[in-house]
Image: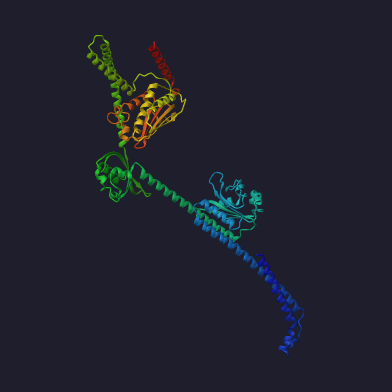
Amino acid sequence: MKNIFVSSRLNRLTITAIYFIIGGIWALYSNKLFDIVLPQHGIARHSAGPCYWCFIVLSSGLLYLLLKYWGSAQAESQQSLHKMDRSLKSYSECTKAMIQAENEITLMQDICRICVDVGGHRMAWVAFAENDPEKSLRPVTHWGAEGCFFEGLQATWADTEQGQGPAGISIRTGKPVVFQDLMTTPRYELCRESAQKCNYASCISLPMRDDKQIFGALVIFDAKPNAFDKEKAFLLEELADDLSYGIKTLRLRAERKQDVEKRLMLAAVTEQTSDGVITFAANGTIEYLNPSFIKLCGVPADEGVGVSIHDFECSKRNPEFYQAVRGTLETDTASAGRFVNKDREGSEHDIDARISPVFDKAGRVVRYVVMVRDVSQELQLQRQLRQAQKMEALATLSRGIAHDFNNILAIILTNSEVGIIEDGADKSAQENLLRIHKAALRGKKAVKQFMTINRQSEQPKQPVKISDTVKTSLKTFQATLPSMIKLTTDVVPGLGLIAGEPTQIHQVIMNLCTNARDALQAKGGILEVSLTSMDIPIERMHQYPDLLSGKHVKLTITDTGHGMDREELEHIFDPFYTTKGQGHGRGLGLSITHGIIKNHGGIIYVNSIVEVGTTFVILLPLIDSLDPQQAKSVVEQKSSLQEQIVSVGA
């Protein structure tokens, strides 16, 4: 720009000098020229006077001034064109950023960067208006003037002393605000020191609005006063409007994306839910069947979608369910009920169904939705509960029979023993009595086991160091393992005492480990045993209704064997039930284990996956968690046991 100005000045001086020289030559030689051209004319004989020379000088000066003004105007025009070119380039870059932006934060940061790097301004930042009681301004992003952003400023858009800044005013009024000289503007007095430190001389704040309200402002600072003339302010105002539109577009896009994601999630949930879902239009045409409904009904989607609900195969096969659907179609009111659903193979399922109309904003029915839940398993559990209650009643009866049977066995044992030891008895008779005695002993043992299953054995309890008992049992069991089975243990020492009988705890561990070994016998694998502590607070008691709150020990036995299916799991603790086949166990091991754990105040449950493995979990209360009455009972049982040992020794 300086070179253009110097060139213009030289041109002005040269032109003026040439004009003056030509005027002087004309004054000196024009008379002679006229004498030649007009020899008889009287005017040619008059010489040039002072006025003529004065005219030449004045006209030369006027010419110089005109040329100087022309040169300045040309320089200003060039400078203005340069500024406008820079502004247009900034606007173009901002437009490109808006097209390419993927989120509003990135867009606003790019706009601020372009205003500084391309537009040549000092700093640009975006503030959002918060709707809190203080009406605070939240800085979203900024660019330029590193280390000079007003981060410590408590900006606000309220009509207070702190809200007289450009951002606050523009948000409050909804109009652009220009401070051409920050050092003299009274409203900027609070920030004048910071502006001087950061070399901010002028600024402009442009409101950003959506369809409803002003939501923020774009504020641009420049290092020169009066940097924002009308043309630039107008262009920046257009930029702020475009930025507002870009932010609005990105928000709408994000909302649409979120809405699509919600719909996809809802569709995924509908596809994966265990509840059956069917939708059909107001005229009864089926629009959608989810996999669970297809599984319940047994009709593929391509045979159901597009078919009238009145002609639907599942409706014809289940008349009670169809009548409920038809009732909703006729009355446009929701209905629910329990029905028996029959599929193509003839299998029956108990289902709970709810048929509901879907209304639009005008209150018209646009479609119907049917939710179906298979409650066969729940009903099966209820049947199992009734069966358990029946078995409990039978157990009460069997305990009385067992008591009487024990009395009968006692008479048989006593008399057979007398006959065996009697002198002079017939040898064959003694052999028969010996066989009777052995059979009676087996009967007594069976009764004892049966009493254990029914949790009525009178085995005395004593404080048991559970960690030591588990370690001893595992040490004994490890000797029976083949090389193809790997035993891993994690027994936490010193977990405390439980109220129990060591022999029975040993029997539980041996039973469970033996079953795991048998499951691993064919292919080998890993048997894991762990013993840890577990605290059950009162608020979690609903998860363990058969336990007391407090500290417990958790015994976990896991194998990687063949696993069990659901039907086997339902009968796993039943007496005389076994999956080992004929001649491999009587099916009493887990029943006895279940009875022992229940008799110790604990619980046992099992999880199993076919071809993955089985996990048994046992929870037993620690003696510290027992109430005083239970603790007193344990002490009394321990004293009774010691007295029995002393009497036997005597």
Compared across the picture, whether 204 is left or right of 436 comes to right
Q: For the N terminus, which image quadrant? A: bottom right
* Image coords of residue 271 (percent x, y): 36, 45
* Image coords of residue 593 (percent x, y): 35, 26
Above or below, comparing residue 628 to residue 647 in the picture = below
* Image coords of residue 521 (percent x, y): 34, 33
Say if residue 370 shows up in the picture. Answer: no
Residue 512, quarter of picture: top left
| Foreground residue among 387 and 644 | 644
Say if residue 129 shows up in the picture. Answer: yes
Residue furthest bottom in the image: 40
* Image coords of residue 219 (percent x, y): 58, 53
What is the basis of the colouring in this image?
Answer: rainbow
Q: For the C terminus, which image quadrant? A: top left
Residue at (71% x, 72% y) in the render: 13
Residue 378, quarter of picture: top left
| Foreground residue among 19 and 109 | 109
Residue at (38% x, 11% y) in the render: 647
| Foreground residue among 548 and 406 | 406
How many numbered dots are placed on residues in this image?
0
| Foreground residue among 219 and 365 | 219
